[in-house]
Image (spheres, rainbow, N blue to C red):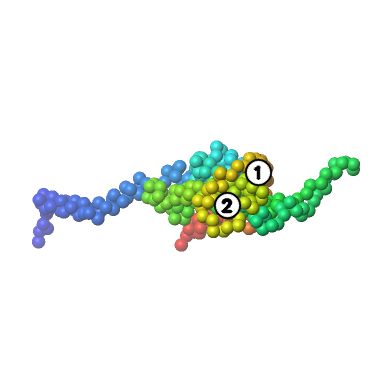
Amino acid sequence: MAASIPTNSTMSTASSSSTSNNSSPSSIKQQLQSIHRKSTLPAPEQTLSRLLVPKFASRAYHLPGNNARQDWIQYMLNNHPVLGICCSHRLHPLKTTQRVIILLGSFACGIAITNILYLWFLTSGKDDEEEVFAMNFSVNNDDSKTYSVSRGLLTLLTVGSASHAVFDRFIWTLSACGICRAGGRFESHATNRNGCCSDLGKYLVILLVLGVVVVATLVVVIRATVEEGNGGDDLPVFHNMTINFSEILQLHKEEFNDWSFVKGYALEFVVSLFLYYPLFESVLFSGVLGCSTLPVLGGRPREIAKERKAQSRELGIHNSSALPV
């Protein structure tokens, strides 16, 4: 039997059939998906962003490749409430406008806490000028000075400062939340491009700061009026707890001139930012409080240890995959 030789018409028919099979909707969709994957591979800038943004958002003590001096400088410049406004890293999730809003909220919160504690001492009948303890300083045998710490000052430095620190940490975490940003746990490229969830914390912080400013303004007016009005005995806010908001707004009609507490707090605020803050953050950075093992308190040594463990695990995986089966 002679073998049949395909004619030209038969070959063209087979070729058209093969072309029609290759151009089916499913194959076209797969080709488009392949092209999309190739075109959306992370660029070097995106890769760097996915690496650094979560670390900046979590106030990381250590960045890959940095020595101790470089890590301390980047930690201070990226996290300081004032220096971070103009010296933070370009990829930091907190931008200049957000940092100014956070600084305003921190200042308003400190003023509110200071005056709330003053009003609490006033309404509770406790003496904020009562001496708790005294410290003697002597330069020479004939020259000695005594510094008295009152109950009000001690309360402000403990309860007030702790509350202020909690607020600063909370508002920072809320604004710089990296969960929905590049490299975060719930990262979504489509969402990040539209800026829906990644900027949610920024808008929540604006609302929170507005509320704190309103409360701080109200408390400042009440305290200034109390100091001018004989201890607040003539103010309905202290003897009538059912006072409505319109009556509170009438406090601005009182005449008062003592705003010295605002100047005092401004001085304290500057000292805390440029003296206490660097000292306290440097102690946390060193890790001495957490013996280099506890979260947050472990500081830079703990993060370096975690990085080395991760590198060891990755190296072990690569070595095991290279072994012959």
- Residue 59, given in percent of the width and then of the height, sits at 57, 49
Name the quadrant containing residue 144: top right
For marks 1 and 2 on the same chain, the one whose residue lies earlier in the sequence: 2
Q: CA distance from mark 1 to mark 2?
A: 21 Å
Residue 324 versus residue 80: which sits nearer the camera? 80
Residue 214 versus residue 9: which sits nearer the camera? 214
- Residue 161, given in percent of the width and then of the height, sits at 65, 51
On the picture, is 143 further left or further right than 208?
right
Write down the residue under mark 2.
167
On the picture, is 97 further left or further right than 29?
right
Residue drawn where x is 22% and y is 54% of the image: 25
- Would you place residue 239 above or below residue 52 in this image? below
- Would you place residue 94 above or below residue 5 in this image? above
Sort mark 1 into few (<14), some (14-19) or many (20+) by Cα contacts within 10 Å: some
Please name the amino acid that badge 2 sits on.
Phe
Residue 235 visible in the displayed image: yes
Residue drawn where x is 51% and y is 52% of the image: 245
Which numbered circle lies on residue 261?
1
Please name the amino acid that badge 1 sits on.
Phe
Judging from the image, what secondary structure is the residue with disc 2 in? helix
